[in-house]
Amino acid sequence: MVDPRLAGTSIADSVVELIGHTPLVRMKRTMELEDIPAVLAMKMETTNPGGSAKDRPALEMILAAERDGLLKPGGTIVEPTSGNTGVGLAIVAAQRGYSCVFVMTDKVAPEKVSLLKAYGAEVVVCPVAVPPDDPQSYYSVAARLTVERNAFRPNQYANPNNPLAHTKTTGPEIWEQTAGRITHFVAGAGTCGTLTGTARFLKEQNPAIRIIAADPEGSVFSGGSGRPYLVEGVGEDFFPAAWDPDLYDDVIAVSDEHSFLTARRISRTEGILIGGSGGLAVAAAIKVARDAQPDDIVVVLNPDSGRGYLSRVFDDAWMANFGFLVECTECIAAVLDARAEDQAGLIYVNPAETVRIAIERMRANGISQLPVCKNTPPFAAAEVAGSVDELELMEAIAKDPAVMDLPVDSVMGPRLPTIGGGQKLELALDMLHTSPALLVLAGGRPLSVLTRTDILSFFEARAHG
Ligand code: PMP
């Protein structure tokens, strides 16, 4: 019941009523700077109370659970999430008197734990390094807590009320805000709730509206295996229930580098602080809008704010370490460029290959350590699992000769320290005091191993040159 004293005022009944109704703004500077003939407009989901698009499905999933009797007064919500969905659920739970338990892995940034706790949620952190069937795993703990607490588990990846929230609200808002003249809709795909739900409404109004999914390079939606990529909140290694390719006219893969640099550029040029997945969606939308007609209206949905990514996307040192930024004129990349052609690429071993193969590969290439990488080309997207080192292998084999025929991942050591191709040579010199080799990253991907010998040869050639 709405408080009758609010009659005639514009005081919202509660914060829940403020979910949705987000503004649509022309990306004026981007249109000028990128030579875009069409109108490019951003749906600003940051103005939701929780700061993201996920407030919408959170509300819809809770209301549906109440209607279906899955959530009783004073009940508990358990969901494995570290992100925006958790915030949305916590906000609605606070207003409607539920408790929330969020289960996440220890890989999650401490700010994310603090954020959910700030909303009064209980947070259970599980080790990331255990298999899914381990009783301590994120999946097992969420399942156990759901039973123990007799809780409701929204399960946003399978819950039809996730896309439905966008069919009921996001789609109609955009239709109305563009006076029915929208021609293209672009959004990043995670659970696919935003993309599919909004598309369902828009296509029903006008089937000619083009729906474009933006996906991190490497994720399954654009044909990858599901990893590795660094952009958060989008891309998957499986197809969620809301994935509906018949609705999409195009899927555009965007690299981490392009996503992050776009987020940084848009934040500066438009004065709209967006995160990595916002950068991804905008990068795809710019591509679409450049090829569009002057009368077209391209709408891109920005899911959340760059505030959640200050220690990553907006941190120059973090960006440089992954090889996304160039800090100097004569950088690490110059050392690699100066090397002989046959040493140029990444020499690595797969986790399942034997120690014998690793030793042969080191010998053939005259090197003393190898990164252990899975998920290798065609994406040139090696995912680093660890490293092996001559000295350590020698000691292991001395203890037990059978080690020779074991898979490399049973004996590998930690990953080599990483450095960006655009970072300073002095940094490499410092780091090589404590590690015999470094892994050079470019665009977030392992590019090559750098050793003391490489730097010495570089100095030597320079002295002669
Ligand atoms: N960006 C961010 C930051 C998100 O948290 C999410 C939600 N996973 C998305 C984009 C994608 O939205 P959806 O799950 O509706 O596909």
Image (spheres, rainbow, N blue to C red):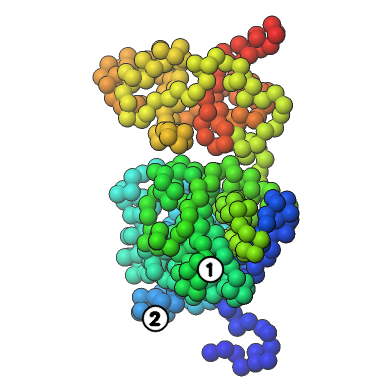
- The residues tagged by marks 2 and 1 sit, at their Cα atoms, a distance apart of 19 Å
> Is label 1 in a helix, a strand or a loop?
helix
Q: Which mark is first along the chain, 1 or 2?
A: 1
From the viewer's perspective, tell me whether residue 232 is left or right of residue 422.
left
From the viewer's perspective, tell me whether residue 204 is left or right of residue 429.
left
**Which residue is labeled 1 in the image?**
55
**Which residue is labeled 2 in the image?**
67
> Mark 2 CB in 8 Å range of ligand 1?
no
Estimate how packed mark 1 is, as few (under 14), some (14 to 19) or many (20 or more) residues with alpha carbons within 10 Å.
many
The image shows residue 18, relative to residue 273, as above or below, that is below
The image shows residue 334, relative to residue 111, as above or below, that is above
> Mark 1 CB in 8 Å range of ligand 1?
no
- Tell me the quarter of the picture where residue 293 sits: bottom right
Give the x, y percent position of residue 451: 55, 18
Q: Amino acid at mark 2?
A: Arg
Q: Is residue 125 visible?
A: no
- Are the residues at dot 2 and dot 1 in contact (C-beta closer than 8 Å)? no
